[in-house]
Amino acid sequence: MKVSTHLAMIAALLHSRAAVTAFQQLSTTSPARLASRSIASTSSRVILSSATETGSAEKGGGSGGRVAASVSDKDILSKTSSSSSSSPKPPAQALDTNPPKGTRDFYPPDMRLRTWLFSQWRDVAALYGFSEYDAPVLESESLYTRKAGEEVTQQLYNFVDKGERAVALRPEMTPSLARMVMAKKGGLNLPLKWFSIPQCWRYERMTRGRRREHFQWNMDVWGVSGIEAEAELLSAMVTFFEKVGLTSEDVGIKVNSRLVIGEVLTELGVSEEKFAATCVLVDKLEKVPLDAIQGELEELGLDRSVVEKLTSVLTNKSIESISAVLPPDSEAVKQLTQLFKLCEAYGIQDWVLFDASVVRGLAYYTG
């Protein structure tokens, strides 16, 4: 027969106390007192929540309801003893609190500085009418390996995913931009003026200030064939420098044209098919001596004297001096002359310097 809720709760509490007392008395001779008390408390809570009927008392239980496991099971102490016959587990390996090699953490003070810097970039880009875009940090590996021989292909963070797809963390943003534009199949209104602040990854030897992951500010103009796009981008760069308090005495922007190298290689009898690969080697000369790339020169079928003559030409630091070694009707000289006139019109001529040794080792650059 059912009793009132209050009587059931009183009976349950009395039974709970009895269970705890009996168990604590039993545990005084046991080395596992702390563990057994925890079990008694748990059993008490179970009794309180389940004691709603008192019609028939369980055998040895006193006042009905469930009997605490600590009372009915005489082997409970051995089951909860801290000693165990099983072999001890090996100690857990200490967690390495350093980020992966070549990466970094951004604690709040660092993050505030990064946010401030990115906001300066975004403000300047908006001032010049650029729209922000982004793309996945994970791309198909083939997007970067289409141009064989480029150094960046040797520095990829690449792997095969669980779907057996060859993928890579992006080392640059330009291939992603090209993929996005091509995906629209001519459906975008040109010219495009887009910018991004991507996080990029390269597995390369680290030097001071050069890690394996970095952020960069990309401003891209798509659909303008003239040199006017380069002049606008240079002006945007100078605007940023001025916003953060730098002057032309602190920073100089070195410029060159790939047409210069192209015309020199033509004069030296190097075929157009070898142009991109030769640019890669010339780009490496900024980091390694000529002897270090001798094997690669031989693979391209280039004589050492070709690169020596090329590097001697690339030491020129003025348009006048480079004009003396290029053909009289040099298209490279015409473009460079026009670029510096536009820089004067923008008022940034003090910031821009000609340096024929500046070479990008990526085949998809044309300027």
Image: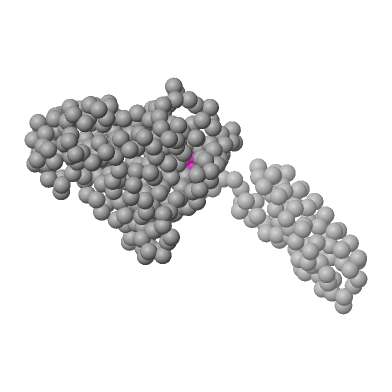
Residue positioned 43% across, 45% down in the render: 219
Residue 92 drawn at (x, y percent): 48, 42
Task: Please identify the dominant SS of the magenta region.
Answer: loop
Where is residue 233 shown, x and y percent of the image?
Answer: 42, 41
Residue 160, compared with residue 126, is above or below; it is below
Is residue 17 shown above or below 198?
below
Q: Is residue 159 visible?
A: no
Depth check: 171 or 123 in front?
Answer: 123
Q: Nearer the viewer, residue 221 or 103?
A: 221
Residue 115 picture location, percent across and down: 56, 39
Q: In this figure, which colouring scheme has been used for the structure?
A: one colour
224 to the left or right of 359 = right
Residue drawn 67% across and 57% down? 74
Residue 234 image-quadrant placement? top left
Residue interval drawn in magenta: 92-96
Q: Residue at x 43, y 35 (%)?
A: 345
Which quadrant is home to the N terminus?
bottom right
Q: Is residue 227 above or below residue 79?
A: above
In this rendering, would 49 be left or right of 141? right
Residue 47, image x, y percentages: 78, 62
In which quadrant is the C terminus drawn? top left
